[in-house]
């Protein structure tokens, strides 16, 4: 059975890892394999052609939460007949939300309209919700802004739960970098964190650092080979950044708050450092048993250990240089993702001048060595096809030829993005 990855924001599933070609969020690995095609009598289909991307995304998330194997056939959700009762309830809840938004989108099963007959007072423990008679309180958390009475509560509570899950999972990964459930929790929480502009006690700089470290942790978790040291390190930094929540007190947080032992101390001004760099420094100092105390942007350490502390400064500064390289890689990855999308649009209409110009732009910006972890032969094929497409556009070749190059390049890039 084929494994799938999905984008909860844009509502689709694919058979390759990477980032969403539309919102560029990291695709989330499904906990299940795709439902294999079987006997039609053993399957039930639901038409969801009127649903928005957001509604489809939340449907995918709920199906994964419930452990329901499924597959999509264009605008039809297909499940095993044994799961029909649970899915009837699920699509009714999300379908009513879609109907409330624009008057369309109710899903129906092939065997009838059981989903539309969902009762408002039905107990929904098997969906992970409490019993309620209020249809709005059962609305999907991502669609809560459609119900004014629940807007502030749902938004705050949803993000609070998401950040709490992120903090808890970071602690578990610091203690055990092989914890697969914590891995999945990080992936689940990251989707909500990445789309939020701010939260709670964190200023803009700290919230940006949380997002940055979360992305690094996801990269370590998604590596082909286990990177346990990197996972433990990034999880520890994330845990310390989230310490102001008070949800996961840690040994390192306590140590960082403990005043240095009496004696001569040296003060270092670190106003230019990012919050995640300061968090990492505290972790490294704790590991070496070096007492320290933060006073705003300054850190106080025992003067007798200056040499060790300054060595840690150099270590973190070197990593920051590596991150600059990672930022460059991230920009090129984004260019490749944009090229993938541009090729898809161009293949749909190879005569459109604006689409041709966009394709040329992203061909140019994606130029360079193979992306990290990518096979050089595969990258050579992609670049060769990209150059052929650029030539066909610049020399105004027949639209059929432009279509062939764009379509083939789009297929080659699918495994990358």
Image (spheres, rainbow, N blue to C red):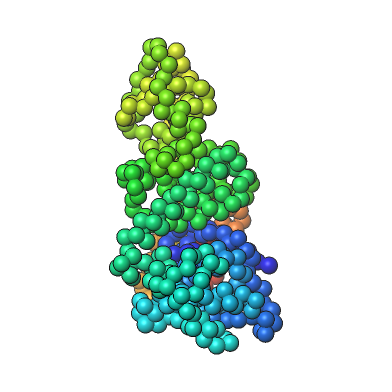
Out of 133 and 239, give the one closest to the viewer. 133
Residue 109 visible to an observer of this rendering = yes
Q: Residue furthest left?
A: 148
Q: State which quadrant residue 397 falls in.
A: bottom left
Position of residue 177 measured from the top left corner of the image (x, y, whole percent): 59, 42
Out of 11 and 250, give the one closest to the viewer. 250
Residue at point 44%, 70% (across, down): 132
Q: Residue furthest bottom?
A: 112
Position of residue 280 measured from the top left corner of the image (x, y, whole percent): 46, 34
Q: Is residue 39 above or below residue 156?
A: below
Position of residue 155 measured from the top left corner of the image (x, y, whole percent): 36, 59
Residue at point 40%, 11% (across, down): 263
Position of residue 43 measured from the top left corner of the image (x, y, whole percent): 64, 80
**Image mark count:** 0
Residue at point 56%, 50% (across, down): 183
Out of 32 and 94, give the one closest to the viewer. 94
Q: Name the image quarter holding the N terminus.
A: bottom right
Residue at point 52%, 23% (across, down): 288
Residue 359 visible to an observer of this rendering = no
Residue 372 lies left or right of residue 32; in this view the side is left
Out of 362 and 271, give the one closest to the viewer. 271
């Amino acid at each position: 059975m084929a494994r799938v990855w999905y984008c909860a924001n844009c509502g689709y599933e694919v058979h390759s890892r990477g980032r969403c070609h539309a919102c560029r969020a990291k695709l989330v690995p499904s906990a299940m394999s795709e439902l294999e095609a079987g006997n039609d009598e053993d399957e039930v289909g639901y038409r969801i052609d009127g649903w928005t991307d957001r509604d489809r995304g939340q449907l995918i998330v709920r199906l994964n939460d419930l452990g329901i194997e499924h597959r999509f056939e264009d605008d039809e959700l297909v499940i095993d007949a044994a799961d029909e009762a649970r899915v009837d309830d699920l699509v009714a809840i999300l379908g009513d939300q879609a109907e409330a938004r624009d008057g369309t989108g109710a899903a129906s099963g092939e065997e009838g309209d059981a989903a539309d007959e969902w009762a408002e007072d039905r107990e929904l423990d098997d969906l992970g919700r409490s019993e309620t008679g209020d249809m709005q309180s059962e609305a999907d958390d991502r669609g809560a802004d459609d119900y004014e009475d629940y807007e502030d509560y749902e938004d705050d509570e949803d993000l609070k739960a998401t950040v709490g899950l992120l903090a808890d999972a970071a602690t578990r990964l610091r203690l055990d970098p092989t914890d697969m459930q914590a891995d999945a929790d990080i992936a689940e929480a990251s989707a909500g964190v990445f789309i939020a502009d701010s939260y709670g006690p964190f200023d803009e700089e700290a919230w940006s650092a949380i997002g940055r470290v979360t992305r690094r942790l996801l990269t370590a978790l998604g590596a082909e080979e286990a990177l346990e040291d990197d996972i433990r390190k990034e999880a520890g930094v994330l845990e310390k950044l989230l310490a102001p929540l008070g949800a996961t007190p840690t040994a390192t947080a306590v140590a960082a708050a403990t005043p240095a032992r009496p004696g001569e101390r040296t003060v270092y001004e670190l106003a230019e450092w990012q919050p995640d760099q300061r968090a990492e420094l505290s972790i490294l100092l704790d590991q070496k048993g070096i007492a320290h105390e933060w006073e705003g942007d300054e850190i106080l350490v025992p003067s007798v250990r200056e040499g060790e502390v300054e060595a840690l400064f150099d270590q973190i500064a070197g990593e920051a240089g590596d991150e600059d390289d990672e930022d460059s890689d991230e920009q090129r990855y984004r260019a490749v993702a944009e090229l993938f999308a541009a090729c898809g649009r161009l293949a749909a209409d190879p005569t459109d001048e604006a689409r041709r110009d966009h394709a040329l732009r992203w061909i140019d910006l994606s130029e360079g060595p193979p992306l990290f972890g990518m096979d050089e032969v595969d990258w050579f094929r992609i670049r060769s096809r990209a150059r052929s497409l650029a030539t066909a556009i610049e020399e105004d070749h027949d639209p059929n030829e432009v279509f062939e190059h764009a379509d083939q390049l789009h297929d080659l890039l699918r495994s990358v993005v």
